[in-house]
Image: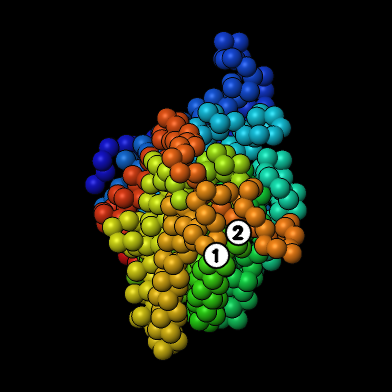
Amino acid sequence: MTVTDISPSVMQFLLAFIVVAPLLGAVAALLPAPPGLKGRNPDQAVLRHGVTVTGAVLIAAIVLATGFDHDHPATMQATTDISWIPALDVRIHLGIDGISLPLLLLTALLTFLCALYSYFKPPAGPSPKAFTALVLVLESGTLATFAVLDLLLFFLAFEMVLIPMYFLIARWGGDQRRAAAWKFILYTLLGSVVMLLGLLLIGLRSGTFDMVALATDNGRGLTTSVQVIAVLAIGVGLAVKTPMWPLHSWLPDAHTAAPTVGSVLLAGVLLKMGTYGFVRILLPVAPDGMRTFAPYLAAFAVVGIVYGSLACLALARRGAKGDLKRLIAYSSVGHMGFVLLGIATMTPTGVNGALFANIAHGLITGLLFFLVGAVKDRYGTADLDTLAGATGAALYGRAPRLGALLAFAAVASLGLPGLAGFWGEMLTLFGAYSPAEGLSRPAFRTFMAIGAFGTLLTAAYMLIVVRRVCMGEHTPHSELSPATTPSDAPEPSGTEPSATTPPRPATPQPGATTPQLADIQTYEAATWTPLAALTVLAGLWPAVLLGLTDPAVQKLLAGGKS
């Protein structure tokens, strides 16, 4: 059943348009604006161009979704298959199913919201022309990653996003942006070189690079040793992009230095490319190799869950001078650990949970980075000790709607039932309780217990963040009287003020008015509302997403058989 009856040729055009239009828009962004479209100034014109192109891509993606046959989500639809390099049998093969369609929609939505946000709040840095062009190239590469069905095209699309993200961090980022950008590009490029070797091994040994044919063959044309080597090589490249502990260390630096839009796209879209590769390539193409490495993948996943949570707790404690953006970045390491745990179970329940957690993380963490960027713009810092302030001076007292939305995003991130973050974590833990045949049940049930403990740690640090940033610090009366502030409080006799000692939060004078910050602006509400609404919708009605992914996952794990 389709919501709208759209012919196959129109569906093919829509998918090709979604992939190619941002690339053409990036070229157009670098050209002079035509007469009549310049607006107040060239910068405004090129930012408006970015909104127009990403908006057109989002509309095309929505139309594509309405024309998608929801009765057969396991079938590749809107397919295009054209010979490109006959000598290597490389084809321009595009198509979508229930696994890739949600990721396609998420990418189109987040990129449009980033373009809209940038139009009203232009990035501080070099020419907006280059910024807009880079965002559009990034969108094209990400959309292509989720749409192509050829191993070599997948690799090209996978790599296409690296250079735009490098420049977004290096040119428009904050402190330490060049070091963070270099770390990002070196980690991901080294991982990609190893991944390419694995992809070539599969293609040359099986005689085809076609992902649909390889999934249908289900590894029967590859020996177990070839599968093990391929999973190890490809898995390293995918694990870096995911990122999986201990290959995650580039992520906190990249998020801390990146501009708001860069952080949203990095967390909401780019991290999904790695986990998508595990599901689309390794699970169906090399099942024996995945079965060999599944326990190790699950072990690394649960270590990442606990490690990310403990790092967040360390950053959130008082006096740690923790950066809120860095804390959200470490939280992504933990959340992506749940995704990897679900994939490692090799069960429909676990893989569906991983795909659901992917989408939930994109919505919730994208919203969190938007909010943290707004808080940083208002306060001039993302330092948690500074943001905590004093009672009455934190977000609830100074920008209540912004504080309320930050609290909403935080409780969604910790997996509150009824919001999107809950279902993915629950399904991955259920999958770990009963893993695929051939995997150790005692080991995976141990991993499940560790993962469940990680959810408690996640709740702990998110609630600490809400208490400190939204409610402020309660300064003990003995430490600082209500009539004094850090500037006039006397130092203890015989001591000198220390430059390394964090300043004590100011307590408002009796009767003093709490200084207000700008609350949520209209353009911010327009940008953030879709993410909050979808977080609630996915939490209350998970069948919408699971109805798409489950049949496709069942077919994928069964070797292409429905």
Q: Quadrant of residue 184?
A: bottom right
Q: Secondary structure at mark 1?
A: loop
- Could you tell me which residue is drawn at 51 percent across and 34 percent down? 117
Task: Specify the color scheme.
Answer: rainbow
Q: Is residue 201 above or below residue 404?
A: below
- Drawn side of residue 66 relative to residue 284, left or right: left
Q: In this figure, which residue is indicated by the disc labeled 1?
A: 317
Q: Are marks 2 and 1 in contact (CB under 8 Å)?
A: yes
Q: Give the alpha-carbon distance from disc 2 to disc 1, as whole Å.
A: 8 Å
Q: Residue at x 52, y 41 (%)?
A: 374
Q: In the current view of this chain or complex, which residue is farthest to the top? A: 36
Residue 322 - label: 2
The answer to which of 465 and 546 lies nearer the viewer is 465
Task: Give the amino acid at mark 1.
Answer: Arg
Query: Which residue is at the front of the view, 535 or 243?
Result: 535
Query: Mark 1, residues whose alpha carbon is within 10 Å: few (<14), some, or many (≥20)?
Result: some
Q: Which residue is at 37% across, 62% downward? A: 415
Mark 2 vs 1, N-terminal side: 1
**Mark 2 residue crowding within 10 angstroms, few (<14) / some (14–19) / many (20+):** many
The C terminus, quarter of image: bottom left
Q: Residue 420: x, y in percent?
A: 35, 56
Question: Where is residue 535 drawn, in percent x and y?
Answer: 35, 50
Residue 150, compared with residue 248, is above or below; it is above
Amino acid at circle 2: Gly
**Is residue 71 visible to the viewer in this orientation of the structure?**
yes
